[in-house]
Image: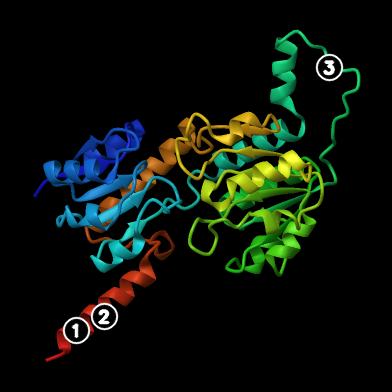
Amino acid sequence: MSKTILVTGPDLDPSAARLVADHGYQTVHTPPYADSAVISEFLQQTGAEGIVSRMGRLDAAVMDAAPQLKVISKHGVGVDNIDIQAAADRGIPVLVATGANAVSVAEHAIALLLATVKRVVPLDASLRAGRWEKPGFLGREIAGSTLGLMGMGAIAQATGRMARGLGLKLAGYDPYAHDSAFETLGVTRCATVEDLLARSNILSLHCPLNEQTRGLLNAGTIARMPEGAYVINTARGGLIDEPALVAAIRSGHLAGAGLDTFASEPPAPDHPFFAVPEIVLTPHIGGVTREAGARVGVDAVRGIFQVLDGQPVAPERIINRKLLAAAQAESAKMEKQP
């Protein structure tokens, strides 16, 4: 048995690495954004029993290359790079580090919001280029505006708490969240996506990327937002139809956007976002802080050893729990057939 944990990415917080070593295991790292073939090769070479998933896609072919694989633990909460159905079909639980990076990502959402609405980046560039653009400039006050939260998980709730301190009113949409998630923060619960869009002077995306949410923000849905609204995305780039967002900003319907994620990462050098000064961009680093890295890394590694040691894992951390149960039931049914 290989006592190895594979990390799909170049680093892991030292506190998480120590936890691996304390269990008598070693970590092996893939290059950043390795493709499936490279990850499969690493799994075959190392015989790793668990994966800390950071960068690169884990699909059925990767899992088939590693029959010894027992658990996948996401370094965060976004699992769109993991085929969770394929994992369930092979009896592999997929874990998430729920809430561990919420504060850091929320802070980044607020930073993007302020930088975008207050035009910090283009004003800084203009001043450095020798222009003094105070004459004729007219800014915007955000206090009293409505921040729409698309999704009401831990990151959205942390963002809402910070936004309230800036005087923003809050509205939210999440058909799966309990009423308490809204009531605690004084968030107006919207019954439909359309209602949330119509209310949002600033829309902040906090939902997972799946077949139901892919392209959620498109030409049709953007048109439902108030004129002069802003979009903030610290979730997943695939939630946005990128050409539609560019078109809405260029037409003046949207005033700008602050984006930490792209549909394809890293983006191509000629990505259209780069030519739109009203868009503030960062390279998917909202949760990449020393503090969040330690919490997320330790949570991810702890979950792996809970599975390997046969210890209970909190049900909400197993993202494919229902799929696993269904796959196991189907397997038992097949075994009973003559």
Judge the density around disc 3: few (<14), some (14-19), many (≥20) Cα neighbours within 10 Å: few
Side of 226 where 43 appears, left or right: left
Judge the density around disc 2: few (<14), some (14-19), many (≥20) Cα neighbours within 10 Å: few
Residue labelled with disc 1: 334
Say which quadrant the C terminus sits in. Answer: bottom left
Report the residue at 27% width, 80% height from top: 329
Q: Decide: marks 1, 2 in contact (CB < 8 A)?
A: yes
Colour convention of the picture: rainbow
Coordinates of residue 35 in the picture (x, y in percent): 29, 42
Amino acid type indicated by mark 3: Glu
Coordinates of residue 290 in the picture (x, y in percent): 46, 31
Coordinates of residue 189 in the picture (x, y in percent): 72, 65
Side of 35 where 231 appears, left or right: right
Whether residue 186 can be seen here? no
Could you say whether the residue bearing mark 1 is in a helix, strand or loop?
helix
In the drawing, what numbered circle is on residue 23? none
Side of 126 where 303 appears, left or right: left
Residue labelled with disc 2: 330
Q: In the image as oriented, which residue stretches furthest toward the bottom?
A: 338
State the residue in front, 151 or 64: 64
- Give me the C-alpha separation between circle 2 and circle 3: 67 Å
Q: In the image as oriented, which residue stretches furthest toward the left?
A: 1
Q: Against 160, is 292 above or below?
A: above
Mark nearer the N terminus (2 vs 3): 3
Amino acid type indicated by mark 1: Met
Residue labelled with disc 3: 133
Could you say whether the residue bearing mark 3 is in a helix, strand or loop?
loop
Coordinates of residue 18 in the picture (x, y in percent): 28, 35
Amino acid type indicated by mark 2: Glu
